[in-house]
Image (spheres, helix red, strand yellow):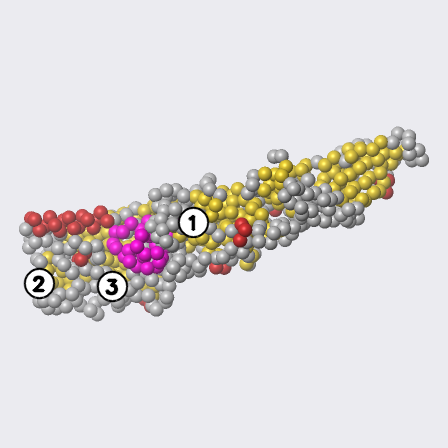
């Protein structure tokens, strides 16, 4: 967009050398329309478009001290205009029309045009003449036509050059805009429409947002001619890369309370957000190297027409525009930078989720360089701003978002709270590299109480949905649709041991003695960790699988389990022992015992009734893999921070 400004200045300089300052143009002045095609995130319900520019030349001169005629400019988009209303009365929005690139400098008429400061009209109307309560006069300055708010031959003061639009449906209208022909050959008048926001989520990926412009009012066609063509000001694309946005899910077995150290939680995995294009993750304002204060830097540097603000959620920031007295409604100023949201579901009872306060780079927490939020650093940095879904749209303060302190200092973890059945963590991007596609990765930690029946399979797996935020607010800038990228968050294995008794019989005069020991308090220690395993207790479910009837009249189906049997609770340090005939008579087959505690061990002893030494045999029950967790039922879990297999006592084992 800055190219247009340079073009205007170059043309004006050309006019000086050509000595054509007093040359007359044609009547009416003619205009060309152009637009800046910017990439828009398809997930955004309120997304900044590119600017629309009207470049006008020629026209007929009018006498000095003549009142400049005013007309209504209307810009119509191919989708709904979402520029925020900053003054409820008359629906005055943050969309702005700027005349002659104010504040960019280099004007051939000092104090006017590009050399004039941004001077907003302060009496925008909903219909009719807008700012005409204060007349604007044509004056001459260095031989060029300029607009003044004084009808005098000397001491000219630049008139209003910035107008706020009234948004309605697909259009935004700027009422009472003065139209003064530049007249001189090689000189152009520029009308820039900025702070146009649209609902990109209603546009198909790869689709475009277009704009057209019209000028109306009595006699407008004799003063200005505007082309009816449309220009492209936005193309939608996925702001989140669905392939690169992932969750690195690990597994744990919930056998004992963890962690044993109350200042830490166990690392269970990571989640990563990858942007779909280089400027999909934006800071609240563009970064600069002069002011660390996030709000101040935008007011100092983000009020220049044509400035590249594609890396910012904010647009052209105008604090002096009409705001209706509401503290947060500064025209063009976003409420916060890009926010990334992780929504957890199916978290088992007794388990608690913690997340890192910042993104993780090469295994360690990212750090801000350059002095603070909104600085010139390009390193990837995001900080936790909410662990409560109801607070995802909290407006940043002048110094950026409020930091959240660690609640688990040993692991940089903060507890995520459950609000209205929504467990969500939200981070805000406060530094980013607009020249690179970035991935922001965050640690996920878990804390849980020992449980015996944690769901671990199918639809009950803990999951995490990754999206932008906020997704629920109807007024914030920016705002987004709900996320659609859902991944397995982690896997929690039930704390149980599965024992196979491969041959069990209670027929033909034989019986099988069954013994199950609970050794969960055995002193499993390591040289580095003298903490014993926690005592556990639970029942075992005995599942009987017959091989066929051994006695006439007994009907069983081979390979089909009969009614399972539940044992009494087997406490730690005890042995449960019973005969098979106490539970199922005339049975021959195998039995699978599912014990709801860690470190169960089994023994089977087959003997002939009345003849204990005739045909007797004994065997150890086999511990088999748990099909629910995909691991052996040994109570071991994968400890992701050390990349070693570790038992609950801290004993390092072979991978």
Q: Looking at the image, is mark 2 or mark 3 earlier in the sequence?
A: 2
Q: Residues within 10 Å of mark 1 (few under 14, many from 20)?
A: some
Q: CA distance from mark 2 to mark 3?
A: 25 Å
* Residue drawn at point x = 15 percent, y = 55 percent: 107
Does the magenta-highlighted stretch encompass residue 193? no
Please, what secondary structure does the residue beneath circle 2 have? Answer: loop
Q: Which quarter of the rendering shows the C terminus?
A: top right
Q: Residues within 10 Å of mark 3 (few under 14, many from 20)?
A: many
Q: Please state if 213 lies on the left or on the right of 576 as rendered.
A: left
**From the viewer's perspective, is the residue at label 2 or at label 3 nearer?**
3
Q: Tell me the number on the disc at residue 367.
A: 1
Q: Residues within 10 Å of mark 2 (few under 14, many from 20)?
A: few
Q: Which residue is mark 2?
A: 63
Q: Which residue is mark 3?
A: 120
Q: Position of residue 408 (x, y in %)?
A: 55, 54
* Residue drawn at point x = 79 percent, y = 46 percent: 574
Residue nearest the observer in this picture, 492 or 128: 492
* Residue drawn at point x = 72 percent, y = 39 percent: 498
Residue nearest the observer in this picture, 75 or 137: 137
Q: Please state if 180 lies on the left or on the right of 238 as rendered.
A: left
* Magenta range: 281-310
Q: Residue furthest top?
A: 615
- Our reading of the magenta stretch's main secondary structure is loop
**From the viewer's perspective, is the residue at label 3 or at label 1 nearer?**
1
Residue nearest the observer in this picture, 57 or 339: 339
Residue 92 against residue 353 in the figure, above or below: below
Q: CA distance from mark 2 to mark 1?
A: 62 Å
Does the magenta-highlighted stretch encompass residue 307? yes
* Residue drawn at point x = 25 percent, y = 54 percent: 305
């Amino acid at each position: 967009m800055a190219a247009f400004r340079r073009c205007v200045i170059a043309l004006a300089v050309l006019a000086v050398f050509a000595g054509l300052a007093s040359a007359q143009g044609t009547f009416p002045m003619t205009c060309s329309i152009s637009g800046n095609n910017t990439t828009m995130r398809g997930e955004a319900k309120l997304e900044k478009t590119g600017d629309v520019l009207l470049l006008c030349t020629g026209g007929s001169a009018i006498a000095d001290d003549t009142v400049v005629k005013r007309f209504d400019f209307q810009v119509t988009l191919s989708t709904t205009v979402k520029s925020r209303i900053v003054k409820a009365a008359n629906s005055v929005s943050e969309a702005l029309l700027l005349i002659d690139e104010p504040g960019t400098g280099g004007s051939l008429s000092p104090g006017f045009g590009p050399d004039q400061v941004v001077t907003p009209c302060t009496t925008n109307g909903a219909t009719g003449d807008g700012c005409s309560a204060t007349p604007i006069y044509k004056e001459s300055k260095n031989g060029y036509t300029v607009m003044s708010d004084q009808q005098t031959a000397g001491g000219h003061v630049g008139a209003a050059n910035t107008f706020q639009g009234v948004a309605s449906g697909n259009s935004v209208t700027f009422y009472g805009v003065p139209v003064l022909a530049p007249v001189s050959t090689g000189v152009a008048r520029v009308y820039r429409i900025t702070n146009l926001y649209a609902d990109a989520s209603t546009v198909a990926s790869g689709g475009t947002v277009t704009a057209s412009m019209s000028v109306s009012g009595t006699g407008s066609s004799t003063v200005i001619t505007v082309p009816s063509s449309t220009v492209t000001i936005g193309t939608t694309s996925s702001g989140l890369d669905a392939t690169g946005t992932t969750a690195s899910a690990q597994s744990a077995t919930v056998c004992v309370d963890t962690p044993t150290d109350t200042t830490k939680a166990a690392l269970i995995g990571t989640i990563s957000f990858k942007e779909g294009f280089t400027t999909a993750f934006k800071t609240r304002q563009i970064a600069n190297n002069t002011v660390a204060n996030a709000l101040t830097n935008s007011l100092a540097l983000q009020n220049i027409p044509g400035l590249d603000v594609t890396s910012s959620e904010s647009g052209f920031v105008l604090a002096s525009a009409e705001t209706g007295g509401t503290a947060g409604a500064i025209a063009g100023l976003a409420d916060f930078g890009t926010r990334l949201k992780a929504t957890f579901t199916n978290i088992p009872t007794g388990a608690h989720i913690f997340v890192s306060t910042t993104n993780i780079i090469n295994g360690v927490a990212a750090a801000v360089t350059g002095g603070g939020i909104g600085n010139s650093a390009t390193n990837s940095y995001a900080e936790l701003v909410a662990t409560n879904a109801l607070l995802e749209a909290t407006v940043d303060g002048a110094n950026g978002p409020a930091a959240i302190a660690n609640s688990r200092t040993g692991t940089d973890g903060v507890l995520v709270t459950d609000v209205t059945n929504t467990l969500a963590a939200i981070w805000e991007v406060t530094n980013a590299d607009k020249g690179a596609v970035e991935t922001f990765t965050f640690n996920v930690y878990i804390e849980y109480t020992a449980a015996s029946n944690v769901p671990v399979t199918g639809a009950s797996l803990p999951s995490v949905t990754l999206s932008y935020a906020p997704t629920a607010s109807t007024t914030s800038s920016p705002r987004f649709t709900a996320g659609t990228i859902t991944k397995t968050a982690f896997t929690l294995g039930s704390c149980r041991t599965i024992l196979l008794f491969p041959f069990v019989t209670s027929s033909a005069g034989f019986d099988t003695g069954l013994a199950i020991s609970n050794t969960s308090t055995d002193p499993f220690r390591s040289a580095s960790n003298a903490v014993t395993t926690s005592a556990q207790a639970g029942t075992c479910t005995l599942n009987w699988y017959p091989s066929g009837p051994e006695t006439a009249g007994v009907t069983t189906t081979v390979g089909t389990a009969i009614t399972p049997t539940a044992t009494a609770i087997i406490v730690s340090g005890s042995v449960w022992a019973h005969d098979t005939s106490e539970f199922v008579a005339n049975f021959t087959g195998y039995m699978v015992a599912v014990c709801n505690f860690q470190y169960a061990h089994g023994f089977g002893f087959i003997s002939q009734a009345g003849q204990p030494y005739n045909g007797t045999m004994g065997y150890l029950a086999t511990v088999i893999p748990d099909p629910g967790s995909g691991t052996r039922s040994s109570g071991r879990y994968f400890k992701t921070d050390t990349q070693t297999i570790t038992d609950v006592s801290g004993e390092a084992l072979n991978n």
